[in-house]
Amino acid sequence: MSDYSTWYINSHGSTVNIVQINKTVYRIENMTQLETMSERPPLRFWGWGYDSEQLSEEEDTLIDAMVQMLIPEGGVEVSPPQVEDFDLPAPRLPVPEQFQSYVSTTQYDRLVHSYGKSYADMLRMFLRDVQHAPDWVAFPKSESDISDIIKYAEAHNMAVIPFGGGTSVCGGVEADVGEQYVATISLDLQHFNRILEVDTKSRTALIEGGMLGPDLEAGLKEYGYTLRHFPQSFRFSTLGGWIATRAGGHFATLYTHIDDFVESTRVVTPSGVMESRRLPGSGAGPSPDRMVIGSEGTLGVITQAWVRLQQRPIWKVSATVTFSTMKQGVEAVRLISQAGLFPSNCRLLDEMEVQWNGLADKACAMLVLGFESADHPVNAAMDRALAIASNAGGEYQSEEVVYASEKPAPEKTSETGADTWRNAFIRMPYYRNKLIGRGIIADTFETAITWDKFESLYTGVKAGIQKAIVELTGAEGMVSCRFTHIYPDGPAPYFTFFLVGDTTGDLQEVLNKWRTIKAVANELVISLGGTATHHHAIGRDHRSGYEQQTSDLFRHAFAAAKAALDPQGIFNPGVLIDPQGKSVGITGIMKDKQ
Ligand SMILES: Cc1cc2nc3c(=O)[nH]c(=O)nc-3n(C[C@H](O)[C@H](O)[C@H](O)COP(=O)(O)OP(=O)(O)OC[C@H]3O[C@@H](n4cnc5c(N)ncnc54)[C@H](O)[C@@H]3O)c2cc1C
């Protein structure tokens, strides 16, 4: 909204880019001008962030120290790629006159839209390995532009891949669509970026699908509301992308998933526009919205949605509890989740997660607890949760529990363990930009599981990944776990792993190792009773797990529904299911791996 980006050549003949992102102005000199039709500040095509963003000096020092610890002998650093390092094949179909004002074929635009932001996506960029760049990148400005593109794509057998912010971590936007399409189109929704209407009485808003998180929140703030959906990728992801992937926000319980916020949807499909009625709830048969939520770009383009808003919370309380074992912490969280308390934060970190983040000076598991409300004090809920945690063996310092009384929470004077962890969490994707070139593998995967099976999943996954790391590298590496979300019937565990893939600059070797570990992770979460994904979506990379956890009958029914909306199967082939009559199978980075 308020962001802008301008370029000029200075008096020394070098290129200067002035960019404003969220009220901060950046000035970058000596950059190659990026040829683009995008009207957003240019994204870093090979990594996380805008092209103009840099790490602070302190962060640079922190990462150097981390690398030094992992690779004391030094090692080779591969530098990030430049646009000129790539020589993409010419688009397989030329752009006809009718689309020339909003379809780009520049190398930069095709690179930005070639991958999402998974570890493997970024690593392949460092390898200068892009085999499925979309032939066209379309920036439609209206639904009729989208319909025109769809008609052309159907007539010329082109696959269409909706693109929101491009933060997919499961191959969801990669144009690897198998052999049965003549060419591919990445359909960038960036011009669908407005709040169209706010119904203050029902506390809902009609918002376009391509609106980025910060713009959406800034717009709603003017009305005193918030969507309060904060995935870690919030800054670069969109409402349509959240809906298409069933995204999970930052909060641990209650209204945190995008599913909870969607009141109705509008989707442009090859068979026409499908729109649902705005209703607070309905028992009228299977829900049309439930089919759209999680459709991952396979049914059409989500151009608009009515979403439920909230007031900004002012009553807040937070606390940190330590446990001498993870097992004690798990029991405490299970009891809290079943007590009807609904904490906004209930993040249990295992011993390894605490140690790696330097959050305590003893070996322990840590529970970061928080309650929030816009309407009433939440002290009693916190007191009850702390009592449950204490009974389960937890320890906390009562003077470190931060209560807000009748006013908004007081400004904190010092950083708590929870703050340190949260800051590192938000900045971690930027740090990865630097770790990749050093051959360090730092990645995450997540699942959800019922409480009865959690213990065996937790120990099985940690042991299995650890074993794979030792077999691949001879060294131990690191595997840790935390809970991102909790439910009365089970948690959503989120695993992080770190290892040195290679120190000689052989990033292909690093990719091979990553693929082996990813295949082990995919297999373990399914075989031990979890879901292939809790909130990262299926995309191409988790498709084998999706096929194991769903029945053939369900997938046939879904394929038949897709055929009604997308009869020629042009929308995001390779994701979730095969279009009827086309066998695309597993494509993307996990092809041939499981
Ligand atoms: C560092 C990092 C942190 C992350 N943290 C979280 C997190 O906390 N919670 C979480 O849930 N996810 C997280 N993700 C994953 C990712 O951000 C989510 O899947 C997000 O919802 C994707 O939104 P997007 O706008 O970037 O969509 P894209 O990546 O552009 O697309 C994702 C999928 O949705 C489809 N799609 C996108 N827009 C539309 C549309 N308008 N209509 C139809 N289909 C569409 C695409 O075709 C693709 O299949 C994270 C990713 C990264 C890299």
Image (cartoon, helix red, strand yellow):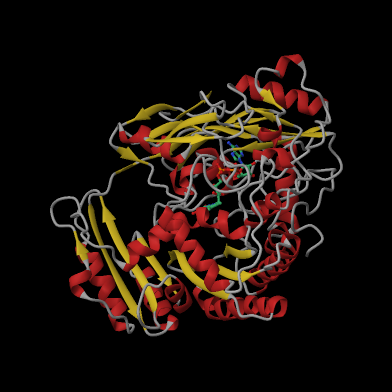
Residue 154 in picture, x, y percent from top left: 79, 28
- At horizontal 37% and vertical 74% (from top left) the residue drawn is 366
Front residue of this view, candidates 312 and 164: 164
Q: How many marks?
A: 0
Q: Position of residue 404 (x, y in %)?
A: 18, 57
- Looking at the image, the residue that sits furthest to the left is 406
- Horizontal side of residue 540 vs 585, given as left or right: left
Q: Position of residue 306 (x, y in %)?
A: 45, 34
**Residue in the image at 70% along x and 47% along y:** 558
Q: Quadrant of the C terminus?
A: bottom right
Asked if one can make out residue 253 in the rendered structure from this viewpoint, the answer is: no
Q: Is residue 106 above or below residue 116?
A: above
Near-viewer residue (358 or 140): 358
Task: Report x, y in % for residue 162.
Answer: 65, 37
- In this picture, residue 84 sits left or right of residue 140: right
Q: Residue furthest top?
A: 97
Q: Left or right: where does residue 65 sit relative to residue 91? A: left
Q: Within the image, what quadrant is residue 252 found in?
A: bottom left
Q: Name above or below for residue 257 compared with residue 369.
A: above
Give the quadrant of residue 130: top right
Q: Nearer the viewer, residue 581 or 116?
A: 116
Q: Is residue 362 visible?
A: yes
Write the residue at 81% across / 52% down. Answer: 585
Please, which residue is most extreme toward the front here?
12
Q: Quadrant of the N terminus?
A: top left
Q: In the image, is 189 to the left or to the right of 65?
A: right
